[in-house]
Amino acid sequence: MSMGFTTKARRGLVAVPVAIGLVFGVAGCGGGGGDDDKPDESVSASRSSESKPDAQEDSSEKPLAELKGPSGLMLKVTAAQRDSGGFVTVSGDLKNDGSKTVTVPAQLSGNETEIIRNGRSLGGATLVDSKGKKRYYVLRDTDGRPLTTTNFSAVKAGEVLPVFMQFPAPPASTTELTLQLPMFSTAVIEISG
């Protein structure tokens, strides 16, 4: 009497070890120790979700600039940091000082089709170097997405949204630039780093 397996039984015997291998493989890939290299795409998610450790520190921290916008919107710039990768990151808080929910103006995204296609953003922001006579636009990733806070459409009364924008870095000798954002006042900011 031979112990032959049918084709169906053989497939079942092969499928079990493969399934077990997949389960252990997937379990080994999850929850890294934090030193995994992240792609540049995660920049907007990680930057926009940063939070301040203490609300009291927030109110006593002197901003680099405050830009007033329409309908009670205000951009408080808290940092403009030159990074080793050849760019400048401007970060701060977008606040609704009004008493009603405000729809974020579409003009903040700018007028470039590639940026507008990726939803609401601060893609219309620019840094102007008056001495060097240059204008720097918000950087984009390889898919055309602006390297800035994205996907917000309304800000409730009193709400504060942490925001950021990344630009190409000006020459090292340039330390002051004018930040421009459509529909907002302009302000001179000092770059650190």
Image: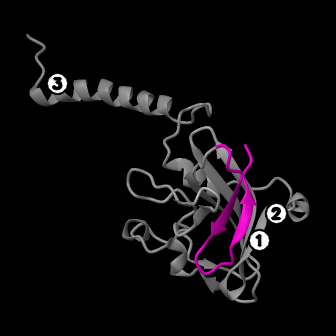
Of callouts 1 and 3, which one flags the residue occurring earlier in the amino acid sequence? 3
- The residue that disc 2 covers is 63
Q: Say which amino acid is labelled 3.
A: Arg
* Front label number (3 vs 2): 2
Distance from disc 3 to disc 2, alpha carbons, whole Å, reads: 69 Å
Q: Which residues are magenta?
A: 172-193
- The residue that disc 1 covers is 66
Task: Depth check: give the residue in front, 32 or 150.
Answer: 150
- The residue that disc 3 covers is 10
Extreme residue in the left direction: 1
Q: Quadrant of residue 114?
A: bottom left
Q: Say which amino acid is labelled 1.
A: Glu
Distance from disc 1 to disc 3, alpha carbons, whole Å, reads: 71 Å
Judge whether residue 155 is colored magenta. Answer: no
* Circles 2 and 1 in contact, beta carbons < 8 Å: yes
User: Which residue is rendered at x = 67% and y = 65% of the image?
Assistant: 178
Extreme residue in the top direction: 1
Q: Residue 186 location in percent, x, y?
A: 68, 73
Of callouts 3 and 2, which one flags the residue occurring earlier in the amino acid sequence? 3
Circle 3 SS class: helix
Q: Residue 26 location in percent, x, y?
A: 44, 33
Task: Depth check: give the residue in front, 130 or 51.
Answer: 130
Q: Give the quarter of the figure containing the N terminus.
A: top left
Task: Depth check: give the residue in front, 32 or 47.
Answer: 47
Q: Which mark is residue 92?
A: none
Q: Quadrant of residue 172?
A: top right
* Circles 3 and 2 in contact, beta carbons < 8 Å: no
Circle 1 SS class: strand
Q: Give the quarter of the figure containing the C terminus.
A: top right
